[in-house]
Each structure stands twice: as C-alpha cells, then as structure tokens.
Image (cartoon, rainbow, N blue to C red):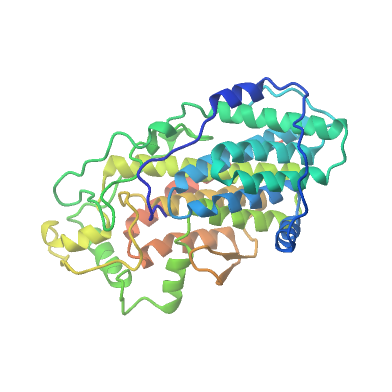
C-alpha cells in the first residue's frame, strides 16, 4: 500500500468529454471489432467470461489497476466506486429493480443489459486509467462482438455511456484533485508522525476532505490513539516491537505469510473476493451490480474516514516510536534505534489503520448483502502463488487487520479502532441502493 512513488493523487477528469456524453440521446458508439486475438488472450477472455457481464467487467477493471499496485489505493477506490455506480445505474435505467445512485437517467426499457454494462465500464475506465486504454478497448470490442446488432445493442451502449458520464460528472470537484494539499509538515515531539524510510513525504493529507460516496463523515469518527503514558500503549509497543521486527523470533511462518499476503492494495484484493463470492452465488447482473457498488462505496468511504482520522491525530508509526521510546515519557517502554519493520511502512500516520478500516467496511458490505458464512479462497498480488481459505468475510477482515501488526507497521490500537470504524461504515453503506420491489 502506497509504497512506491506516490506524491500526488492525479484523478483524471475529462470535462469536455463528460459534457458531450451527458448530451447523448440514443446514438450508440460505433465500434469496429479488430483482428483475431492471440491464443493466450482468448484463453484469458474465456476465463473472465465465467459469471455475468458485471463480474467480467469488474475483473477487467482489476486488470487495468494492477500496474498501480502499491502506489495509490485511494484513487483506485474512488475510480472503482464510480465504475460500479455507473454500471448499477445503467442497469436500473433498463429495469428499475434497485434505487439508482445518480438520478436522472432516462428509462431505457428494451436495451441490452450486457451492452449497457460494457459501455458504462469502458467509458469510466478509459477516463480514469487512460494508460490502460488498449486493454479496455480490446475488452470492449470483444464484449460488443458477442451482442447481436440492433436497437437493443444501440440502446444499451447509449444508456451505459450516459450513466458513466453522469456518475463521473457527479464526482467533479469532490476534493480529490486537492488531496495532496496542504503539504504535510511534521511537528516535533513524542507521538508526532515523522516520515519513515524510504519516504520524505506524507501522502494525501487532504484525502479526509474528499466527499464520501454513501456515508455522513461526521457519524464515523474515532476518539484517538492511546496516551503515550498508558500501560495499554506500552503493551502495544512491546508487542509490535517483538512480532513486527524484520527478523522477529516470535513471528510464525504463517504470520509472516499473512503479513505479505494482505500487503496488497485493499481495493484490488477485496474486489477479487467480492467477484468470487458473487460468481459462486450466481447473482444476476442487477444483484451483482448492487453488491459491487456497495463494496466499493464502503472501500472509498473507508479511506476517506480513515484519512480524516490519520491527519487529525498525526500519530507516529511503530518504527518512529520504537526508535524514540526514550522520549515518550513511559517507564514501561524501551528504545531500539536499530529496529526495522518486516514490511515497508506506508507514508501516512498510524491511527487508524486504514487497511483495517477498508477491509472491515468491505466485509460488512458483503455480509449485509450475501451473509457472512461464505467459504472462499483468495489470492494476492504481493504473495503470488499463495492462496488462503476462509469460512467467512469477517474471518478474512480480521486476518487482514492483524496482518498490519505482524508486518510491524501499525499499533494494535490502530487496528482495533480501525475495525470499529470500518464495521460502522460497512453497515451504513449496506443499506443503500435499496430494492424498489
């Protein structure tokens, strides 16, 4: 998470393009299907095709965002929320089964749902990740080639494009473009967040001011980290110092695996988990679109609420705290100036653990729509070739949160309170986009 080169969040907005697309009536995009794919590409497309159009385009979106792993999960969460809001709204313009997210789309009865999903996804992804236009265009050509030409296809394309434009237009001026400001300047003194190696900056100090997708931010705030003088703080520091050290003698092989497995950007990992669960439940396009929208609203709002807390409390990371324990005024702590964490510390303050917040927020959104007792297997970009099995979404969220302590990059209190914040956000989001019949 945020461990490569993030200094600014550059969220792409195409104002003239949006205005043009909002004005669409019933004119569909003409698209020539190009060439025959290579065998490997065809096999990859066939694998994606298990499930419905919504799960297929979610998988394509994950592919498009893979190159940004480790750089900007906040922007990922925002873009994925816009994507799935657009897909959800396009489908509900064709057949209104759930409340729309962005109102105002004209009815599109008789339009092709698959064409609508493809067009909505294509427009959002090309605008949000233009460097992946070739991948997205190829997927779009394949999707349209499988739909018979005619009025239904044309209508689906038109409503998909209009929904994408409306949802992107809604997020203009949402605060994301200004999230790198003001530049964070560390304050001196015990407990104060300081830059951690190899970084010389703090990422996106204004992300907590981005407009949420589904929650009222004032209802989702925390009290703050433990007092430095408390026994609870001393216990937390001692535990992360022992288990999170780069060469820890008490961290088990499985705990090391957990730390590496969950180090992946949360939007990518939790969307794959949602995709797996939705396909196993065999949800139709409409139900799948709602679940994905809610999961991604929860992820996006979890980051916003988490960052609001991070930069309000500005609490130091374990790495800084362990090096400077002699200054914290707690007689139960002991400094180790050579201590290093098992994983690289992301360039943001400690409290709360947003990785925990967004994991629990996504899990609660899934629990609220699919129930908790769902068995699944998950994989990870940060530990290729390893899969982990879970009996419930809550078990995965719990392990995800604990991974940050095993990694040596969060205090236990940041994880505990992150869990509470994330659960509240996920439960609030799970009631949105209600059925209309």
Tell me how many marks there are.
0
For the C terminus, the image quarter is top right
Where is residue 70? Give x, y as percent.
Answer: 44, 55
Where is residue 123? Give x, y as percent.
Answer: 64, 36
Q: Horizontal placement of 153 versus 65: left or right?
A: right
Look at 28% across and 53% down and name the residue there: 199
Residue situated in front as seen by the camera: 100 or 365: 100
Q: Horizontal placement of 71 versus 128: left or right?
A: left
Look at 36% across and 39% down and name the residue there: 308
Q: Horizontal placement of 428 versus 209: left or right?
A: right
Compared to 8, does 354 lie above or below? below
Residue situated in front as seen by the camera: 235 or 251: 251
Residue 256 is drawn in which quadrant?
Answer: bottom left
Compared to 424, does 41 lie above or below? below
Where is residue 99? Give x, y as percent.
Answer: 68, 31
Where is residue 223? Give x, y as percent.
Answer: 32, 43
Look at 65% across and 54% down and name the residue there: 275
Residue 106 is drawn in which quadrant?
Answer: top right
Q: Horizontal placement of 281 versus 295: left or right?
A: right
Q: Is residue 181 visible?
A: yes
For the N terminus, the image quarter is bottom left
Look at 62% across and 54% down and name the residue there: 274
Q: Is residue 101 visible?
A: no
Residue farthest to the front, as pictured: 35
């Amino acid at each position: 998470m945020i461990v490569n080169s993030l200094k600014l969040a550059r969220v792409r907005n195409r104002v003239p393009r949006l205005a043009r697309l909002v004005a669409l009536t019933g004119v569909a995009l003409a698209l020539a299907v190009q060439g025959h794919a290579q065998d490997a590409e065809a096999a990859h497309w066939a694998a994606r095709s298990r499930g419905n159009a919504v799960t297929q385009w979610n998988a394509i979106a994950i592919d498009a965002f893979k190159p940004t792993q480790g750089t900007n999960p906040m922007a990922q969460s925002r873009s994925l929320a816009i994507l799935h809001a657009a897909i959800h709204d396009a489908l509900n313009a064709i057949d209104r089964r759930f409340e729309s997210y962005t109102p105002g789309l004209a009815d599109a009865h008789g339009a092709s749902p698959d064409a609508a999903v493809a067009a909505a996804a294509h427009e959002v992804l090309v605008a949000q990740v233009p460097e992946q236009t070739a991948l997205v265009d190829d997927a779009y050509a394949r999707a349209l080639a499988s739909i018979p030409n005619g009025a239904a296809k044309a209508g689906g394309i038109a409503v998909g494009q209009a929904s994408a434009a409306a949802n992107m237009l809604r997020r203009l001026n949402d605060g994301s473009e200004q999230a790198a400001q003001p530049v964070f300047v560390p304050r001196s003194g015990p407990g104060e967040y300081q830059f951690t190696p190899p970084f010389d900056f703090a990422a996106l100090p204004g992300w907590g001011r981005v407009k949420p997708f589904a929650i009222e931010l004032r209802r989702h705030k925390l009290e703050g980290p433990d007092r430095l003088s408390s026994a609870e703080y001393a216990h937390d520091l001692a535990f992360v110092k022992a288990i999170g050290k780069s060469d820890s003698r008490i961290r088990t092989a499985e705990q090391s695996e957990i730390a590496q497995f969950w180090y992946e950007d949360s939007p990518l990992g939790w969307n794959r988990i949602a995709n797996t669960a939705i396909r196993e439940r065999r949800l139709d396009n409409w139900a799948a679109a709602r679940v994905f929208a809610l999961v991604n609203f929860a992820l996006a709002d979890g980051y916003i609420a988490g960052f609001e807390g991070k930069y309000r409390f500005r609490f130091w990371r374990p790495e800084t705290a362990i090096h400077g324990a002699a200054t914290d005024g707690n007689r139960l702590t002991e400094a180790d100036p050579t201590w290093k964490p098992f994983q690289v510390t992301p360039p943001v303050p400690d409290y709360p653990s947003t990785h925990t917040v967004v994991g629990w927020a996504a899990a609660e959104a899934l629990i609220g729509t699919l129930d908790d007792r769902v068995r699944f297997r998950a994989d990870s970009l940060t530990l290729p070739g390893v899969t982990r099995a879970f009996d419930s979404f809550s078990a995965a969220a719990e392990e995800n949160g604990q991974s940050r302590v095993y990694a040596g990059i969060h205090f236990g209190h940041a994880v505990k309170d992150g869990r509470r914040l994330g659960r509240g956000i996920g439960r609030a989001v799970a009631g949105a986009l209600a059925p209309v019949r």
